[in-house]
Amino acid sequence: MLRKYAYFRNTLILKLISMEVVFNKPFITGRETHHLARIALSGKLSGNGAYTRICHDFFEKRFGFRKTLLTTSCTDALEMAAILCEISPGDEVIMPSYTFVSSANAFILRGAVIRFADTGPDYPNISPAEIRRLITEKTRAILVVHYGGVACEMDEIMEIARERNLLVVEDAAHAVDSFYKGKPLGSIGHFGTFSFHETKNIICGEGGMLAINNERFVRRAEIIWEKGTDRAAFYRGEVDKYGWKDIGSSFLPSEITAGMLYAQLEAFESIQNARKALWSKYYSALKPLHDTGKVMLPEVPEYATINGNMFYILAGSPSERDALMDFLKSKGIQAVFHYLPLHSSDYYRDKHDGSDLPNTRKFSGCIIRLPFFNEMKEEEVNYVVEEISRYFR
């Protein structure tokens, strides 16, 4: 009885006041300043210092990655993966069209031809059947994107790669602490790339990480990471001087970035628990609208887990999506759309093979991402849900 009273009281209050609900608020644990002060006093501000190493150690021990390397962004991690795949001009790479532009740019910078694949009909992850359709004798790699932290069908994708001797890159920008049949995402393909951008689960403003899952790539990855030199080996005392060994760039972040990230890793469990609870709260509250066909909720396959990366709903059409977003905006709620299909972008439209990607168009036109951040209050969630329900009433 008390819970019902509290709910109706809160609902009444929300109707009487004007509430603003932003899309994202970066979560700060409070320990960041402690680590930044230690770094400042240490005299070591540039990259690959003590904080970089303890961040590497955290991910390698917790998720079993063979080797991890922090980067300044997930974009940089993708560019390193493209170099390690030894992509040459004219090589073909298969990836979803429904992804961020960095996924494609990393390979285009190496001269690749991108073959854009459609998603499956139920979730905006790449379709294995589409991968098979697009393979040619020029295909060298497959890039998969675990959208919203939900796993692609990795057994079938890895089987395709083994059959054709292809490399697999997991774009796991959304997918830290998500799993496929018990295996951490980013650990299944040859490479995994992660984002610590301020909109992600674990953040340091801008930042990323490359996970290397095959021993044969480890030494070269470290050289590429350190501007094409073996300086990392020099720091470990393995060589008496370092020099230019390969192509590379300054992919590694400063110790300041690593210190910010480590403060988040100290609170990893509580951050993840809060985000997964928020995802479940949205799902339960919006399920009646799903059951009556007003909106569609994310369909998470049995083989996948959720990690609280984001929450989206799917409107019935692009016009309904736009109208609902306008309505929510008028109520002070920042709900946003997501990716525009890369195959129909200004840059790639004339380079695309012309195939229609209907599922990609559907998700791009109908997805609405709802406000989602660690410290989102219950009354804010209730307000978002109530206003969505009000729109359909």
Image: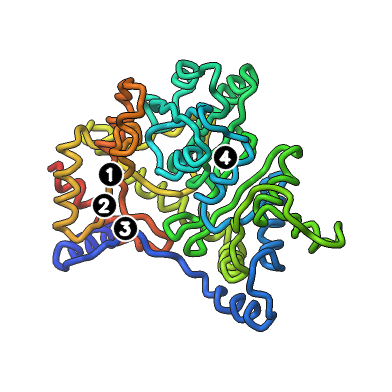
Give whichever of 352, 116 is nearer the camera. Answer: 352
Looking at marks 2 and 4 on the same chain, the residue that comes earlier in the sequence is marked by 4
Q: Quadrant of residue 364?
A: top left
Q: CA distance from mark 2 to mark 1?
A: 6 Å
In the rendered structure, which disc, 2 or 1, sits on the residue that comes first in sequence? 2
Q: CA distance from mark 3 to mark 4?
A: 32 Å
Amino acid at pointer 4: Ala
Q: Which mark is residue 368?
A: 1
Picture quadrant where residue 137 is located? top right
Q: CA distance from mark 1 to mark 3?
A: 11 Å
**Residue 182 shows in the view:** no
Q: In what quadrant of the picture does the C terminus appear? A: top left
Q: Please name the residue that numbered disc 2 is placed on.
A: 335
Specify the quadrant that holds the N terminus: bottom left
Among numbered discs 3 and 4, the one appearing first in the sequence: 3
Q: Nearer the viewer, mark 3 or mark 4?
A: 4
The amino acid on which the numbered mark 1 sits, given as a three-letter code, is: Ile
Rendered location of residue 105, percent (x, y): 45, 42
Which residue is the site of mark 4? 82
Disc 2 to disc 1: CB gap under 8 Å: yes
Comes first in the chain, label 1 or label 3:
3
The residue lying toward the viewer, choosing from 16 and 145, is 145
Disc nearer the start of the sequence (2/3): 3
**Residue, far bottom:** 41
Q: Secondary structure at mark 3?
A: loop
Side of 265 where 348 appears, left or right: left
Q: Residue at x 31, y 34 (%)?
A: 363
Q: Quadrant of residue 45?
A: bottom right
